Image (cartoon, grey):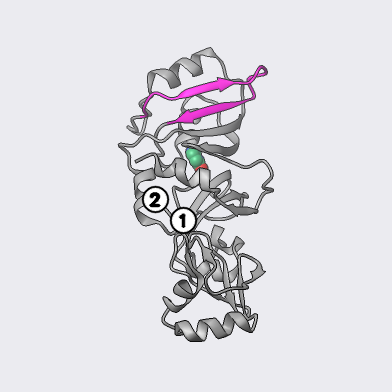
Amino acid sequence: MERRERLDKILAGTGRWSRREVKELVRAGRVVANGAVALRPEDKYDREGLSLLVDGEPVDSGGSYYLMLHKPAGLLSATEDPRQPTVLDLLPPHLRRVGLFPVGRLDKDTEGLLLLTNDGPLGHRLLSPSRHVDKVYYVEVEGVLDREDQEAFRAGMVLEDGLHCLPAELEPEADGRSGLVVLREGKYHQVKRMLSARGKPVQYLKRISMGPLRLDPALERGEWRSLTEEERRALAALG
Ligand code: URA
């Protein structure tokens, strides 16, 4: 199915210009689409992730945005906070006004993969407790991870505070100081609480994947990019 739409339709759809005015704007070279001066009003674009500027001012094309962010430590996974910086502060101003929210939270000191979108239904589907989307974390701990920790994770833990954790995977590295944790749920501070309960407090935590999305190794801390078509399809396929 052709998802792309004519540029004049997208711009006229904002209600700010008629189609005839859009044609004039484009002819005068005042419209920049995805970083390049738009040449023809009839050229087609995918609204999703489309960056549109008119006279250098961003225009909200009304599409959904899907961004992969390499969250650095020190920022809140929130859309706003009166005192502390949030992950949205890493985005350019026009992307802070399109209703993006982080899909699931990472603690302030946790790094790694964070999906930002303004597609509410998709966000809710991914977060739904019944969906069990796998999340993989790289973890460094105080102490040494061993086979007993691995078995406790595999069996599903009940923490002293009453938190019931679904069976999870723990794959220690050879020296036991670090490893991978795979969770199928996302309860508050869950990795830290599970490892503290094993007497191996977390020293460093980084999410490296969520469902079909893997943190792009080309993204430095604080960098982001739009999801590729293939990544968007893989998320949509989660149903
Ligand atoms: N588990 C945690 O303890 N913290 C996170 O940020 C994510 C998972």
Q: Earlier in the sequence, mark 2 or mark 1?
A: 1
Q: Is residue 122 visible?
A: yes
Please give the name of the residue rendered at 45% of the width and 44% of the height, measured from the top-left corner.
233
Residue 183 sits in quarter:
top left
Q: Is residue 110 visible?
A: no
Residue 5 as seen in the image, left or right of residue 25: left
Circle 2 — which element?
A: helix
Q: CA distance from mark 2 to mark 1?
A: 7 Å
Residue 24 as seen in the image, left or right of residue 123: right
Please give the name of the residue rendered at 34% of the width and 41% of the height, measured from the top-left corner.
239
Q: Which residue is mark 2?
A: 123
Circle 1 — which element?
A: strand
Where does the image place residue 236, in percent across and percent down from the top left?
A: 40, 44
Where does the image place residue 85, in percent across and percent down from the top left?
A: 57, 62
Please give the name of the residue rendered at 62% of the width and 72% of the height, measured from the top-left corner.
38
Disc marking residue 117: 1
Asked if disc 2 and disc 1 are in contact, CB closer than 8 Å, the reply is yes
Label 2 CB less than 8 angstroms from ligand 1: no
Residue 134, compared with residue 171, is above or below; it is below
